[in-house]
Amino acid sequence: MTTSSLRLRAGLVSIALLAAFLGVWHLATRSTGTVATMSPEYAKLMGLTATQGKSAMPGPLDVGAKLWEHLRRPFYDNGPNDKGLGIQLGYSIARVGMGYLLAVLVAIPLGFLIGMSPLLSKALDPFIQVLKPISPLAWMPLALYTIKDSSISAIFVIFICSIWPMLLNTVFGVASVRKEWINVARTLEVGTLRRAFTVILPAAAPTILTGMRISIGIAWLVIVAAEMLVGGTGIGYFVWNEWNNLSITNVIIAILLIGVVGMLLDQILARFTRMVTFPE
Amino acid sequence: MSIFDNPFDPDRNLRAGCACGQHQSAVEHEQATALRCDPIESEEKRYEGVVASAVMRAMFPQDVARRAFLKSVGASTALAALSQFFPLQTATEVFAQTGTPEKKDLKVGFIPITCATPIIMAAPLGFYSKHGLNVDVVKTAGWAVIRDKTINKEYDAAHMLAPMPLAISLGLGANAIPFAVPAIENINGQGIVLATKHKDKRDPKDWKGMKFAIPFDYSMHNYLLRYYLAEHGIDPDTDVQLRSVPPPEMVANLRADNIDGFLAPDNICQRAIYDGVGFMHLLSKEIWDGHPCCSFAASREFITTAPNSFAALTRAIVDATAYASKAENRKQIAEAIAPANYINAPVTVLEQVLTGTYADGLGGVKTDAKRVDFDPFPWQSFAVWMLTQMKRWGQIKGDVDYKAVAEQVYLATDTRKLMTEMGLSPPASAYKSFAVMGKTFDPAKPEDYVASFKIRKAS
């Protein structure tokens, strides 16, 4: 059994599953057909759900048509509250990027420091243990209150939620570098800074990148919720705005896109991880 | 000599002859005071008149000389000649803007409901730009967020529920920050919607144990629903459950059977009917005809740091409100505010709300042109009523100086002045008595009013 045929068969199963899912979805959301009789004058004032017994849940065809509409013009701008999906996603990615980058800048040096010093590691441990499990959205009211700016608050929330996995993984990676390698470096009288960059960093890199990969996933999860709260721009705002209009079709499209972008972000980090992984 | 009399009148008596010294005779004085409340046919005409008078006076500062000139050429010729070499049109435009706004680019927050109609429509229909402002109207997720963003100065002014500025100024549910209301957005325009399965339970006495949603604790919706229930012998604190739910989630919750009904702002009520999940039990108008709902609010700080911007903003809102109050404009407004950039709702729904011809959810079509109406004047008696209800339901503990708070937050005097300048006819008093479900409210005796209710929270 070759791997290529396995891949082929897995692909076929995937497609079959998708087709089955879409089929069931389509059947489940067909019009029920039971419609109360109403005067035409009254019917004109009512929605399709009430007049044609149309399911409140859109079918795959509705979603597909709407998705095509969005994809055809992703960057339109009709004013501050109505922008294309491309622009909304851009805002979200920019926010995630900023908060995440700040977290990288803080977590990795700090992680090195903690990992290389047993004293700091013990001293900071209780703080990290308490702060780590806090839901990032719980920070939101506090951030809004103190920072007094909703978009910076959103970035802060991304920062605070993506810092912990990176920090812990960096600490773990740095602390568990093989003692032999450090000892060799010591015998060769390599300085601390040089030791950190030439021995520990390459050795700990795969663990650090795993932490970064976990973080980006969390950051992307959180941005949607944060934007739903503060509003204005971003894919989370788009979901909220369409929810406001009870447009489930657009909400489903947004869900789909959030998934795709999340997967892409994860794949990018996965590729980096593979680049720094080494065989022992 | 006043700037209000007509300098183009050659027969004008130059000796003052009335009590205030501004008019030629006591009769004319009376006429003028009465006339001040009549709207002039158009704003442009009105401003034009004022500007032309000012120019005429500037050219002939001597009354006698001006009179001689007018007598020899006639008033209309004089005006025509004047406009030949003086850009009256431009001067009028400049005058209409009055003081230059300190800040032209403003952000105004709103919640996507039809109560915000004047705030929203002022953008697509150009009321802000007419008053020299460049305003971004920004959709906001909920009342708490709009409050925080306005307090944080991300918004210069915002759409708020009418009791919110009172609550914020008093420090209820937020830090006490002085806020002010220059204009009420809408009157009426809310409704009690029940799930379709309750269509035979129209008597509120049968509602014990039901769950109702309201948009916010400090809302007219909360007070009106509580009032309505209490008048029917239901204690809103013990007999039913009231939940604070963001309006868009109300329809979904009603469909999912999580709540039995709600007193919500429109378009949410009509949306529930449109989607076939509920019916209109009662318009809020039937509880209190002419009740305020939402307000246009700004912090005192904004008003003092940018008084001209604030005045221009208020003018734009008052202007838009006056436009929205005309039935013939409502269809156009519905179309202007329906897109995703604004309310983001089907036009059919908005039209039903604004025109007042609507499906009631039980198979009938009803018509009530006053289902929602727009009247900008911030009656201080409205504020006093809201404070009595805050007191009644235990939101305010201890004593409150009703009148002082109402007068500090509801800027009736300033708005009256502004409306008069705009040629509208504001009421002379800031207090009026009104009836809520047949019970008269006397704004002069708030404490007695609170005490007169049998059902209220023991304080």
Image (spheres, rainbow, N blue to C red):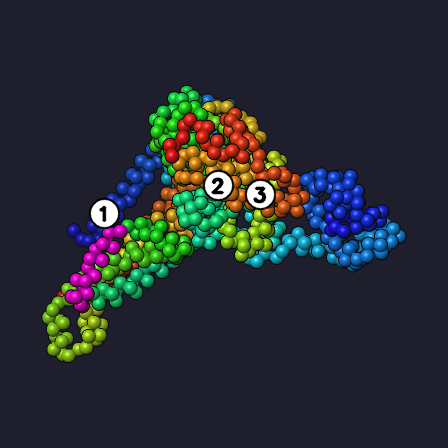
Task: Mark yes or no: residue B69 visible.
Answer: yes
Q: Is residue B425 left or right of residue B169?
A: right
Which of the pair B375/B86 is nearer the observer?
B375
Gap in angstroms between the C-alphas marked 1 and 3: 76 Å
* Residue at 56% over, 45% down: B411
Point out the image quarter for the C terminus of chain B: top left
Name the kind of residue labelled 1 in the image. Arg
Name the kind of residue labelled 3 in the image. Ala
Name the kind of residue labelled 2 in the image. Asp
* Residue at 44% over, 53% down: B152
Instruction: Considering the whole magenta stretch, tell me its main secondary structure.
Output: helix
Mark nearest the camera among 2 and 3 is 2
Gap in angstroms between the C-alphas marked 2 and 3: 17 Å
Which of the pair B379/A116 is nearer the observer?
B379
Which subunit holds the residue at mark 2? B
Q: Label 1's element? A: helix
Q: Which residue is mark 1?
A: A9
Q: Which residue is mark 2?
A: B401
Q: Which mark is residue A25?
A: none
Q: Which residues are magenta?
A: A115-134
Q: Which mark is residue B412?
A: 3
Q: Is residue B28 left or right of residue A12?
A: right
Q: Is residue B77 left or right of residue B182?
A: right
Residue B66 percent across, percent down from the top left: 83, 54
Q: Are marks 2 and 1 on the same chain?
A: no
